[in-house]
Image (tube, rainbow, N blue to C red):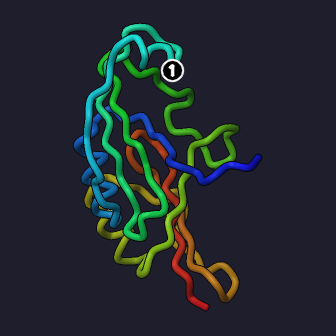
């Protein structure tokens, strides 16, 4: 038995509207928003009294999704350190292929993104960079050049 597909990656944010704007600016499409709560949700996530808002974002090709989640209760826990470096254990980076990395970086900076390093040519194939996005998540961008 093998998996059928990877369905989505979830990012917990404190400002759902700002996160939706950020990932829309990146080029993702809002698929829908909903609120979830109740005993079934509590049982699934292993927390009591869950009330959260979810925005599902999808890439233009329809193959990848981000689930942006804002917990109303219980309150979201802060990560330590608040902005972990790229070599921190665990999941904290998501990468997107883009047409124009310079334009994308400029547009995302207007929404609070900060470069961790710089946009760099990687061999003759890609230009790459890491940005800090919503909730401190690292958003990597790759522009194919060759």
State which quadrant residue 136 falls in. Answer: top left
Residue at image coords 42%, 64%? 62
Residue at image coords 37%, 34%? 69
Figure check: 11 above or below 133: above
**Along the line of sight, the residue nearer the viewer: 142 or 54:** 54
Find residue 9 and report its horizontal and vertical position in percent: 51, 45
Task: Judge the density around disc 1: few (<14), some (14-19), many (≥20) Cα neighbours within 10 Å.
Answer: few
Find residue 86 and report its horizontal and vertical position in percent: 63, 49
**Along the line of sight, the residue nearer the viewer: 43 or 84:** 43
Numbered circles on residues, count = 1
Residue that extends furthest to the front in the rendered view of this protein = 1
Residue at image coords 46%, 24%? 78
| Relative side of 124 to 41, left or right | right
Residue that extends furthest to the top in the rendered view of this protein = 48
The quarter of the image holding the C terminus is bottom right
| Relative side of 100 to 143, left or right | left
**Along the line of sight, the residue nearer the viewer: 17 or 44:** 44
| Relative side of 94 to 104, left or right | right
Find residue 46 and report its horizontal and vertical position in percent: 53, 15
What residue would you read off at disc 1? 44
Figure check: 74 above or below 133: above
Residue that extends furthest to the right in the rendered view of this protein = 1
Q: Secondary structure at mark 1?
A: helix
Residue at image coords 27%, 29%? 35
Find residue 95 and report its horizontal and vertical position in percent: 54, 61
**Along the line of sight, the residue nearer the viewer: 28 or 75:** 28
């Amino acid at each position: 038995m093998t998996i059928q597909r990877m369905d989505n990656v979830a990012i917990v944010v404190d400002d759902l509207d700002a996160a939706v704007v950020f990932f829309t600016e990146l080029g993702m499409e809002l698929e829908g928003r909903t609120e979830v709560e109740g005993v079934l949700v509590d049982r699934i996530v292993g927390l009591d009294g869950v009330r959260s808002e979810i925005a599902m974002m999808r890439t233009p090709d329809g193959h990848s999704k981000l689930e942006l989640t804002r917990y109303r209760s219980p309150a979201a826990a802060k990560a330590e350190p608040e902005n972990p470096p790229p070599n921190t254990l665990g999941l904290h980076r998501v990468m997107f292929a883009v047409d124009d990395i310079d334009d994308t970086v400029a547009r995302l900076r207007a929404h609070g993104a900060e470069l961790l390093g710089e946009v760099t040519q990687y061999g003759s194939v890609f230009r790459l960079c890491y940005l800090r996005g919503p909730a401190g998540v690292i958003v990597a961008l790759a522009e194919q050049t060759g």
